[in-house]
Image (cartoon, rainbow, N blue to C red):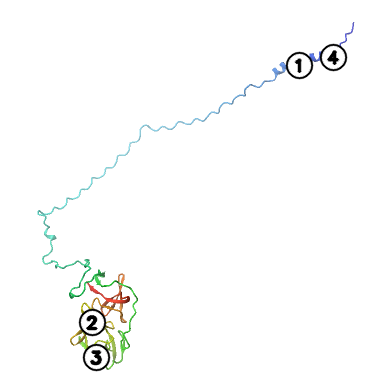
Amino acid sequence: MQKITLPVTRLKGLWLAILFFIASIASPAFAQDRPGRPATPPQRPPAPRPVAPPPAQRPQVQPARPPQQQRPPAQQRPPAPQRPPGNVRPPGNQRPPGNTRPPNYRPPSHRPPIHHRPPGWKPNRPAYTRPPHIWGGHRYYAYHHYYSHPYRPYVFGPSWHPLGFFLSAVAATATIVAINDMQYQYDAGVFYAPANGGYQVVAPPFGAIIPAYPPEAVSMQVGGDVYYYFGGTFYAPVPNGYQVVRAPAGAIVYNLPDGCTQVQAGNITYLQYNGDYYQPIEFNGQPAYEVVEIEQ
């Protein structure tokens, strides 16, 4: 037999062709054995949502309301009493006979007018132009405005003594003054009464008459009348001397003696001496005191 030899290059080409042929045949078979991936990934089924229970249905028929309580009928007022014919008050409401008010009657709460002149005043005495201060059922009249200042007792000379002062003996110049079945010793504006084997200073008795007023006394006119003031006492001239009188309303003094009592009447503090009331004021730029008129 004749041996056939092929060139090497042709053998290489033949082997490559055989390998290529075998690979083309094996690729489809391998592809069929390997599971292929789906074109689109599989979708998960949606999770089921919990179904809400159906709402409870209200009953179609509502329970009937209890019957409302009825209010009792309004009470009727009794008919008003009818007045007798002729619009005349019954006899029980009539005032008793004889209980008639005087023409000048004023109820207790009545406030007197500003221009007031107390009963018994002379026509030449000026009326009060200020309303009274009402306290404790009384009316206190004054011409001047209340001006508060401290009370400082005044000493009216070396021979003058305050109330309650005791002496074993009075001066030889003392004068005996008798009034109301009592005998007093009077000397230099001071009245003495016997006490404990001596003499004690007492308040001047109203109505007592002395032969002469003290030399240090101050004269003044009040409502056209002349008075003399000394040691808290007022003297009025009389035919046989000078008489101790009450302090005239409206009189103004600058000094008050020891022994005054302070009386609080609301927002005003009065000074009381021997039964007379003095209101602190300011007069001519100085602290002073005015005698007030007191009425019921």
Q: Residues within 10 Å of mark 4 (few under 14, many from 20)?
A: few
Q: Nearer the viewer, residue 231 or 100?
A: 231
Rounded to the nearest whole Å, what is the CA distance between mark 1 and mark 4? 21 Å
Q: Earlier in the sequence, mark 1 or mark 4?
A: 4
Label 1 amino acid?
Answer: Ala
Q: Earlier in the sequence, mark 3 or mark 4?
A: 4
Point out residue 15 in the picture as x, y percentages from the top left corner.
81, 14
Q: Secondary structure at mark 4?
A: helix
Q: Secondary structure at mark 1?
A: helix
Count the numbered circles shown: 4
Q: Is residue 287 left or right of residue 7?
A: left
Quadrant holding the C terminus:
bottom left
Q: Earlier in the sequence, mark 2 or mark 3?
A: 3
Label 4 amino acid?
Answer: Thr
Q: Nearer the viewer, residue 219 or 27?
A: 219
Label 3 amino acid?
Answer: Thr
Rounded to the nearest whole Å, what is the CA distance between mark 2 and mark 3? 21 Å
Q: Earlier in the sequence, mark 3 or mark 1?
A: 1
- Residue 9, labelled with which disc? 4
> Which residue is denoted by mark 2 in the rendering?
227
Rounded to the nearest whole Å, what is the CA distance between mark 2 and mark 4? 179 Å
Picture quadrant where residue 148 is located: bottom left
> Which residue is denoted by mark 3 in the rendering?
175
Residue that extends furthest to the front in the rendered view of this protein: 284
Rounded to the nearest whole Å, what is the CA distance between mark 3 and mark 1? 178 Å
Query: Do residues under tags 1 and 4 come within 8 Å of each other at their CB atoms?
Result: no
Point out residue 64 in the picture as x, y percentages from the top left corner.
33, 36
Q: Earlier in the sequence, mark 2 or mark 4?
A: 4
